Structure formats: C-alpha cells, structure tokens
Amino acid sequence: MSHTAASPLGDITPAEFLRDYWQKKPLLIRQAFPDYQSPLSADELAGLALEDEVESRIVLTQGDIPWELRRGPFAEDDFKVLPEKDWTLLVQAVDQFVPDVAELMSAFRFLPSWRIDDIMISYAAPGGSVGPHFDNYDVFLLQTHGHRRWKIGQRCNADSPILEHPDLRILQDFQQQEEWLLEPGDMLYIPPGVAHYGIAEDECMTYSIGFRAPSHQEILHHFTDFLGQYLSDQDRYSDAGMSVPAEPACIDDASIERLQGIVLELVQDKAALATWFGRFMTEPRYPELIQVQEVETSLVDEELSNGYGLIRNPSARLAYRQEGTEHLMLFASGEHCLLPITLLPLVQLICEQDYLDCDALLSWRQNPEAWTLVEQLLAKGDLQLEGEDE
C-alpha cells in the first residue's frame, strides 16, 4: 500500500519553496515521504522494460564503451548477462502504466498540474549511475529503496563541454559543490541547468518526478505552425504609401519595421497563444494509449447508477483556462473545446481528479451541455468507465 505525504516539502511552505528554490537552487528534504512504500519492486520494474509500449534504457558505467546505453524493450536474457554492479535501468512514464505510482503526483499539487511530465523510475545495482549531467527541466528525486549518493555541481548551459558520446550528454568537467547521501523517504529537488551526479551505494530505486518545459525553439516553431493553419494566402506583405527608395537594392529600416509589425500583430494575439499553449502542454506522451471508443449513453447511465465512476486515462492530460466571465476552454490531450462558464465546477472536477465519483457525475446528468462533455471525453478515450480495462 502506498502513502503520499500531505506536503513533501518538510518545514518549508509551498510559497517559500517557490520564492527561494524553484528554478533557483537545489533543496534536500529529509524524509519528505517517510512512510512511502514503492508499489513496484525491482523485478516488476524490469518486467515493464520487457513491454514494447514502454520506453526503457540501461546504462552501464563500463560496457562496450564508457557509459554504454542500451535501449529497450528488453528480453529476460538481457538482464541475466548484466554484471553484479555499475549499471542502471531507467523506465520512463511508469505513472501511465501503474496507477499506484501515479498517486504520488497528488503530493505535488502546489505546482501547476499541466507542468508535470511523468514519473521515471530507475533501479541501480551498486555503483550504478548515468554519469554527471544536467537537465533542462525541474526534477524531484525521491529515494524509495536503498541509498544513492548525490553530488551537486556547477550551473551549466548549452556551452558547457560534454564528452564525445553517441547517446548521452555526460559532462566533461564536473565541479562538485555539495554532496548528500539519500535514504528511503528522502527527496532532492534539482532546478534546470544544475549539474548532478548520482551513484548507487547499494541496490536502490529512485523516482524522478519531472516537469515539462518547452524550449523557446519549440514555442516559436509550434506556435507559428499553429497560427499558420488559420492564415489566408491572401494576407501578404504590404508597403503601400512607401517613399521612393534611395537605393533600390537596399532593404531599408522602414521595410523591416513593416515586417516586424506583421509578426508582432500575429504573436500578440493572446487568445491564439493561450489556445495553442493549452493544446501543446496537454499533448500526451503516448497518444496511442488513448483510443477512440464507442460510448452507449444507456450503458454509461447504468454503470453510474450501479455505483461505478469514471477514471481518467493515465495517458490523458487535462487542463483548463477561463475565457472572460462567460466561457472557459478545456484542453484534453492536445485538443480543446469552448464551454460555458457554468460548467466550471465540472471541468475542475474532471481536470483535478483521477477518479470521478458516480454521485458527483450524476448531479450533472440533467444538464445537456455537461453530459455531452462527459460523453465526448469518454468517446475520445480521455475518460474510461471504472473497471472496463480490467
């Protein structure tokens, strides 16, 4: 049985954490989850790494090359030939395959839920590590079994030298500044760009709760692609009223200012930006796990009347945004819909709860717009009838 802490920040309040640590400096929290028991054993984690739909890797400190990376899915025999020490198994997005693991995310509600990416779990043999590196996103590292020694290094960026390696970004120069030994229940927060180097003292498991952070390149690229879908080919660069050019071959400042005006007008469309951002941040990691399904209204009514609820698909991402005083936007797995503000309590329930109680849902049964929304989310596969996939 797993247990999540009311607050994983110890004596620090969420407001203090956001003010003093978030995206600024590391924080060690002793016994952030003192009673947490991993719902997944090392053998069960290895079993997940055998599945085709699960993203997994093994890093060997000394394999065919230093820091050798092997990609899954693996076979059982792959684990039988591993050495007794100095290797790490990493399995991505375990929360999407093991509901008990996903429960851990509820402890991080002091941060926007649409920022949470996934929970990666690593198992390491003694001496196992993925090398000194830095990430471009925030991560909480929760020790759930065994002991791992974490060395904290310098601030890094795109210019920080890395080793020549075909697969991994291992820092060439790691400048240790702090060192902590974590035991079960301890958690370490690492902000983006801070070098860190974890080494297993014994057999250990670590949960990595990562957060989505799109790069500026992604933002510009994907947003302009989104805008382009709604622009007409008839909208063209215009220079009506321009003066006679002194040099016909010269692109003057006035031309660039006209062009800049076009670009600024497009990107300053706040409504379009918000719509794109909500869709982009709710795109699922594994869209193939969200299947369109046929929904019979009578069956939904019958199941809810019998006391069954609805469950959010573990791969679905949901968020919402209020649009003025009359409307709100619901974002569901990369898509969106405009709804009346009267549905806000229902939308909040859908976005914030993994399990939707039958009584809470049936209170909306007589509202046609509300029930249409529930049926649409079921048809899309973002919601599922309780027990239908068992």
Image (tube, helix red, strand yellow):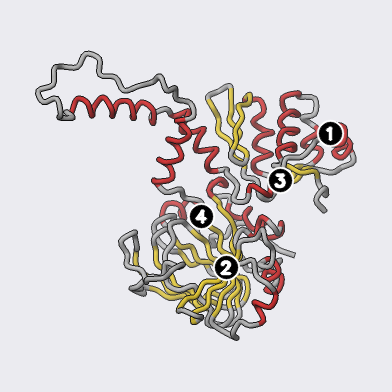
Q: Quadrant of residue 85?
A: bottom right
- Residue, x 76% and y 44% (percent of image)? 384
Q: For the residue marked with disc 1, what is the amino acid?
A: Glu
Tell me which label, 4 or 2, sits earlier in the chain.
4
Q: For the residue marked with disc 2, what is the amino acid?
A: Arg
Please say if 32 is above or below 240: below
Q: Quadrant of the C terminus?
A: bottom right
Tell me which label, 3 or 1, sits earlier in the chain.
1
Q: Which residue is mark 1?
A: 296
Q: Quadrant of residue 143?
A: bottom right
Distance between mark 4 and mark 2 Cα atoms: 40 Å
Left or right side of 79 for 265: left
Distance between mark 3 and mark 4 Cα atoms: 29 Å
Tell me which label, 1 or 2, sits earlier in the chain.
2
Left or right side of 334 for 45: right
Confirm or deny contact between disc 4 and disc 2 (CB under 8 A). Answer: no
* Label 2 crowd bin: few (<14), some (14–19), many (20+), radius 10 Å: few
Q: Which residue is mark 2?
A: 71
